Image: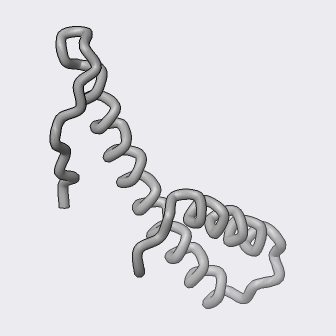
Amino acid sequence: MEEIKFEEAIKKLEEISKELESGELGLDESVSKFEEGMNLSKICTKMLNEAEKRINILINNDGEIKEENFSPEE
């Protein structure tokens, strides 16, 4: 999946959830949508974890706010 912003991923997850809850999708399409949703969920979790690490770097410098270089895990 190409680079996607967090807000876009959340919006897409909400759309997928509504589609699945509607009960109008066939089994194959439901499984495909579920798989897409799981992939988006993993992307969102990774983005949130990276943001949390950046925040911790900012606030855990002996009480001083000091930004350090941050390189997200791949």
15 vs 64, left or right, is right
Quarter of the view holding residue 34: bottom right
Where residue 46 sits, quadrant-wise, is bottom left
On-image quarter of the N terminus:
bottom left
Q: Residue at x 59, y 58 (%)?
A: 7
Residue 47 higher or lower than 62, as above or below? below
Say how many tags the image has: 0
Check the image and report above or below for 58 versus 26.
above
Q: Position of residue 5 (x, y in %)?
A: 50, 64
In the rendered view, would you say 32 is above or below 3?
below
What residue appears at the point 47 percent right and 70 percent down from the top-left corner?
4
Q: Residue at x 19, y 45 (%)?
A: 70
Name the residue rendered at 41%, 62% in the picture: 43
Residue 3 is left or right of residue 21, and the answer is left
Q: Is residue 2 shown left or right of residue 61?
A: right
- List x then y, in percent, for residue 48: 41, 46
**In the rendered view, does 50 fall on the left or right side of 36?**
left
* Quadrant housing the C terminus: bottom left
Give residue 66's position: percent from left, percent from top: 23, 25
Q: Which residue is situated farthest in the top direction here?
A: 63
Visual colour scheme: one colour
Image location of residue 51, percent across then percent down: 37, 42
The quarter of the displayed image where residue 18 is located: bottom right
